[in-house]
Image (cartoon, rainbow, N blue to C red):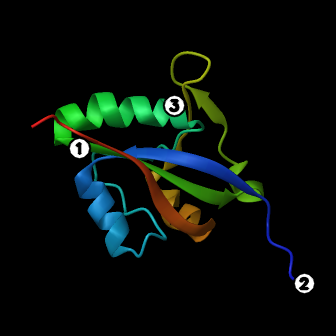
Amino acid sequence: MPTHPATTTLWRPTGPVELALVRALDWRAWPPRLPEQPIFYPVLNEDYAIRIARDWNVKHDGAGFVTRFEVETDFVRRYPVQQAGGSTILELWVPAEELEEFNAHIVGRIEVVHEFRRNA
């Protein structure tokens, strides 16, 4: 029986534009960063991702989504955990030029686990 690599669960808060690009990539990769986005930053806990999607993406984009995905643990260890605020505000900072390699280590599909929309 083949063994599967150990994985680490990551979350990413995202807006509708980025989510459409992920959908176009068959839910298996993150799109390339724009020139003004030198870092791709998945987060290490769901609650932090929810807060960004609900409080920032909805305000700026009209909708916010929380995605969850798995990355090979041995690969993702190369990115030190960054504490961007309180003890639970933890991110990985993946340089844009490494995103294609990062995507190659995603196991399975990226899935939407929460959706928030501006009240009509």
Of 14 and 95, nearer the camera is 14
Question: Which label belongs to residue 63?
Answer: 1
**Residue 49 location (% of width, % of height):** 46, 36
**Residue 84 location (% of width, % of height):** 51, 23
**Residue lying at the far left of the rendered structure:** 120
Of 98 and 111, nearer the camera is 111
Q: CA distance from mark 2 to mark 1?
A: 43 Å
Q: Secondary structure at mark 3?
A: helix
Query: Does the CB distance between marks 2 and 3 fall below 8 Å?
Result: no
Residue at position x 80%, y 71% in the image: 4
Question: Which label belongs to residue 47?
Answer: 3
* Image quadrant in which you'd find residue 24: bottom left
**Residue 80 location (% of width, % of height):** 67, 38
Whether residue 97 is visible: yes
Residue hosting label 2: 1
Q: Amino acid at mark 1?
A: Ala
Question: Which label belongs to residue 17?
Answer: none
Quadrant where the N terminus is found in the figure = bottom right
Residue at position x 65%, y 44% in the image: 79
Q: CA distance from mark 3 to mark 1?
A: 17 Å
Q: Secondary structure at mark 2?
A: loop
Q: Secondary structure at mark 1?
A: strand
On screen, residue 17 versus residue 98, left or right, reads left
Is the residue 51 above or below the residue 16 in the image? above
Q: Earlier in the sequence, mark 2 or mark 3?
A: 2
Quadrant where the C terminus is found in the figure = top left
Of 61 and 98, nearer the camera is 61
Q: CA distance from mark 2 to mark 3?
A: 36 Å
